[in-house]
Image (spheres, rainbow, N blue to C red):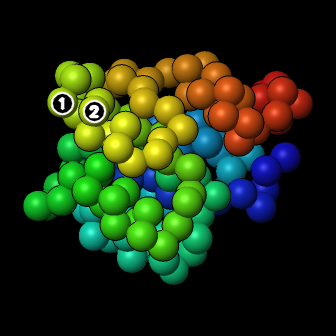
Amino acid sequence: MNRNKTVLIVEDDLILNLLYESYMEKLGFDTKGELVYGKTAIDVTKKISPDLILMDIALEGDMDGIEAMEKIREFSEVPVIYITGNSDPAHRNRAEAIKYTAYLTKPVGFEELKQALLEAKIITKEEANV
């Protein structure tokens, strides 16, 4: 199991945040969640050096998830999976400018997230058999 892997969940919808936490915990990750601001995500990433970030694009405050990842990329190459309701080309193009692992459009189910983690080799097939 991934008990030593930490995922930072940045999602301003509390229900979805809790859902993603349950998905990731089911896959063996330690979760740090309930972050709704890009600035907080930057600060927490500096502090805990997560193994993965699940990042919503539309966040509370004046910084979106893509801007937060631009800042995080200044000091970390942590894999990021964008989870967003914004599947339009403008958001996708902005996200592509910052190296990401996957770009998933809401609603995101457990199997879809697990498949993205497998494809990115963040989890193994053995770890995915839950």
- 124 left or right, relative to 40: right
Dot 2: element: helix
69 up-or-down from 56: above or below: below
Amino acid type, mark 2: Asn
* Residue 115 appears in view: yes
Compute the Cα span from label 1 to label 2: 5 Å
Looking at the rendered image, the quarter that the C terminus falls into is top right
Residue at image position (29%, 30%) is 92
Residue at image position (27%, 70%) is 39
Amino acid type, mark 1: Ala
Judging depth in this view, the residue of 20 and 68 nearest the camera is 68
Number of labels in the image equals: 2
| Label 1 sits on residue | 90
Quadrant housing residue 51:
bottom right
Circle 1 Cα neighbour tier, 10 Å, few/some/many (<14 / 14–19 / ≥20): few
Do labels 1 and 2 touch, CB within 8 Å? Answer: yes
Residue at image position (46%, 45%) is 99
125 up-or-down from 36: above or below: above
| Label 2 sits on residue | 93
Q: Position of residue 59 (x, y in %)?
A: 22, 50
Q: Position of residue 70 (x, y in %)?
A: 34, 59
* Residue 14 appears in view: no
Residue at image position (39%, 76%) is 43
Q: Position of residue 34 (x, y in %)?
A: 38, 58
Dot 1: element: helix
- 76 left or right, relative to 120: left
